Amino acid sequence: MKRLLIATDAWAPQVNGVVRTFERMVDEFGRLGIDVTILAPSDFRTIPCPTYPDIRLAVSRPRTVRAAIVAAEPDHIHVATEGPLGFIARRWCLSKRRMFTTSFHTKFPEYIRARAPIPKSWTYSWLRRFHNAGSGCMVATPSLERDLTQHGFRHLMRWSRGVDGAVFRPRGDDRALDLPRPICLYVGRVAPEKNLEAFLSLDLPGSKVVVGEGPARRALESAFPEVYFLGFREGEALAETYAAADVFVFPSRTDTFGIVLLEALASGVPVAAYPVTGPADVVGGAGVGILSEDLRTATLAALQIPRERCREFALSYGWQASARQFLDNVGRAEAIFALGNGSEVGLHRSDDAASRPA
């Protein structure tokens, strides 16, 4: 494979795990001699996403998107997201009998349910149909793979993540956060699905710090005036903030991985989280974090974990290995597609899998 097209509805200037992952993949694929085309909202007219205006969704005629795909002359197409661009790219692949892969990044059924009274089973049914049309769906963790298998997803392939240990590292001083200690830090979107109230309402010594932006920030600042909301940070400023913290508190119950976990650990900061998909897979029983349904107990216990142990563990996750795992999955997907021989049955049997119960 020499030319890869990634259709993604999540791209800069958005800041989230999907964007950060594919930004790193573009760099790593380039080092491997692969020319990458990103089909992103920035290439088209956009509108704000309902309930989340910071995210812009592409609005374009399908033929314009299809023309962009054809112009890229890709050897392989990866549909990264289930938004407008991902949907059009998927439809084009099916119409042309082109093999493609997808990846499952976000538990939209849980996210949507947190915002509207829509049954999770409805959303899982739609997502199953979307992803089963491809020849491989990449997932970040074993627990997510098990969960999606139970919901009828097929051809699931493991694709882990990485961390830049040169950027995220212990700094030897705490000037970035001159606050009462211990400092309990959260980094990520400030949105309802992140369950931030579970962290911010805890009775903890020291200081609570939130780094990030999102639609829930104003309400949370009003409800928790004692919490330090620092807004969006990136690069050295973000890395210095991680390194100045004493414990990283991750209250989300819906994340599929959590790159921020690796960034905190690489900075020498132990993790406190719930024992759910993401933390359970990344931290698990490695001795670099505490997972418990009692988040306060987990936070206080995590303070006792040696920082050097966290750093050593995180460095076992590399972006180069992640990129090679992605490419291995593409090879597996090609074999799956070949077995179906690109036939009508091979393409659409899985596409109609939504008829099965979740």
Image (cartoon, rainbow, N blue to C red):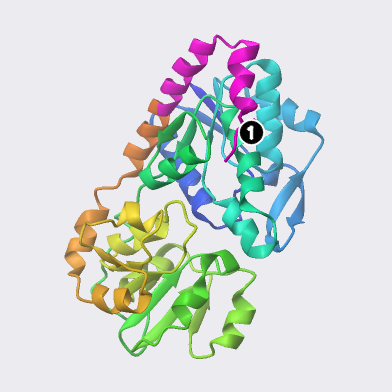
Who's the residue at 52% across and 16% down the image? Answer: 337
Residue 129 horizontal side relative to residue 254, left or right: right
Q: What secondary structure prevails in the magenta region? A: helix
Who's the residue at 24% across and 76% down the image? Answer: 301
- Do we see residue 164 in this rendering? no
Q: Name the residue under label 1.
A: 354
Coordinates of residue 215 in the picture (x, y in percent): 65, 70
* Location of residue 218 by image quarter: bottom right
Who's the residue at 64% across and 16% down the image? Answer: 97
Is residue 152 shown above or below 76?
Answer: below
Coordinates of residue 273 in the picture (x, y in percent): 37, 67
Kindly give the residue lying farthest to the front in the view shown: 357
Coordinates of residue 5 in the picture (x, y in percent): 57, 30
For the residue pair 143 and 138, the one nearer the viewer reads as 143
Q: Which quarter of the figure is the C terminus placed in? A: top right
Q: Of the residues shown, which amino acid type is indicated by label 1?
A: Ala
Who's the residue at 29% across and 55% down the image? Answer: 165
Is residue 262 shown above or below 97?
Answer: below
Badge 1: residue crowd in 10 Å (few <14, some 14–19, many ≥20): many
Coordinates of residue 3 in the picture (x, y in percent): 53, 24
Magenta region: 329-358
Residue 108 horizontal side relative to residue 319, left or right: right
Helix, strand or loop status at disc 1: helix
Residue 134 horizontal side relative to residue 172, left or right: right
